[in-house]
Image (cartoon, rainbow, N blue to C red):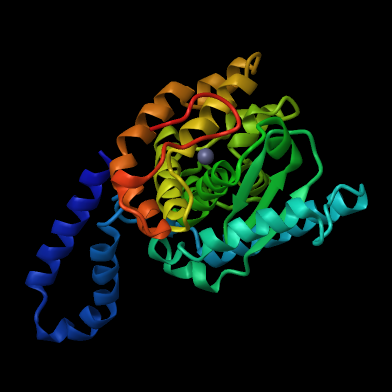
Amino acid sequence: MVMAQGMQWHSRFGRWRARAGAMFMAALVVASPVAAQQTETREGVNVGENSRIAKLVPAEKLERLATEQYGQMMRAAAGKGALLPAEHPQVQRVRRISAQIVGQSQRFNSRASQWKWEVNVVNDPQINAFCMPGGKIGIYTGILEKLKLTDDELAMVIGHEVAHALREHARERAAKGTLTEVGAGLVTSILGLGDLGRMAVGAGAQLVTLGFSRGNETDADLVGLDVAARAGYDPRSAIRVWEKMGAASKGAPPQWLSTHPASTTRISEIRKHLDETLPLYARAKGLSVDSLPPYTSNWGEPIR
Ligand SMILES: [Zn+2]
C-alpha cells in the first residue's frame, strides 16, 4: 500500500516532467535532487514521499513550538532532579546510538541535517520514548529498565521515534486536525505523545486518544528499521522489542488497544520487511546476509 503510493508519486512526477518544456528548466533543476533521492531510497524500505497534506502547516512553526515544549519538559525534569546528567552511562549510550541513527536520517528528510538534535534521558518509570519535530529526543529510564533493552533494541526504539519526526507525522496530524490554528493545546497533544508512552500507566487520557494513526505507526516501524539497520543495528531486534512491549503491557487500558496496532500485527509487518533491511545491516557489519548469526537478546529465543 505504502509502496504503491510512492510509485504513484513517481509516475505523476514523470508525467509532469515529460510535459514540462524548456521554460520550466529552472524548476527541474530544483526538483532533480528530489528525484535522485528517490532513486537512492529504493534500496531499503520504500515508503514514498512525506505527506503532502502536512505541508499545510509550516515546518518551522511546528519545530519552533516543539523546541519550546521540549525545553519546558527538560527544565521541569531537571527541576525534579530527574534529568540524567551528560556523564551518566545511559545518557552516553542513548546519545551514541541516536547519533548513529541521525547520521542515516538525511535520506528520509532533507531538513534533518539542519535540525538541532537534542537527546536526553529522563528518570521516570514510564515505558516511554519520543522524538518531537525538529529532532528533540526523550527517552525514559522506564523503557530502558523494564524492557531491558539491548543496544540493538534501543536502536529500534530510537529509530521508530526518529522516523515519526523524519516522516513529519505530527505535522501531518496538525494539518489534518479540525483546528484551523495550531493552538497550544493541540501542539501539546501532538508533540509530547510518545506513542510508546501510550502504554505507560501514567499516560493521560488525552495522550491515549491522540496517538498517531496505524498507517503512521507502520510507516515509523519501517523507516525506523531502515535507519537503524544502516546504522549497524539488527532489524530483527525490532521483533523482540514488540514482544517485550506486549509482555509488559498486560493490563494496559483498553484505550491503548483501540489506538495501537496489536503487537502481533506489527511483528508480522516488520518480518515482511526484513528482506529489505537485513542487507543494510549486513553491509554495515561487513557481512553477507547468509553469514549473519541469529539475533540473540537477553530474553526469548534467538531470532533467525
Ligand atoms: Zn510510533
Residue farthest toward the right in the current orientation of the protein = 80
**Residue at x-position 80% and y-position 61%:** 86
Q: Position of residue 18 (x, y in %)?
A: 7, 70
Q: Position of residue 31 (x, y in %)?
A: 26, 75
Using the rendered view, name the quadrant where residue 202 is placed. top right
- Relative to 73, residue 207 above or below: above
Foreground residue, 144 or 127? Answer: 144
Answer yes or no: is residue 135 visible.
no
Q: Position of residue 38 (x, y in %)?
A: 26, 63
Q: What count of labels does the image hold?
A: 0
**Residue at x-position 37% and y-position 45%:** 292
**Residue at x-position 33% and y-position 40%:** 274
Q: Position of residue 158 (x, y in %)?
A: 57, 49
Please give left or right for residue 221 compared with residue 140 in the image. left
**Residue at x-position 40% and y-position 24%:** 265
Answer yes or no: is residue 99 visible.
yes
Indicate the quadrant containing the N terminus: top left, top right, bottom left or bottom right.
Answer: top left
Foreground residue, 281 or 166? Answer: 281
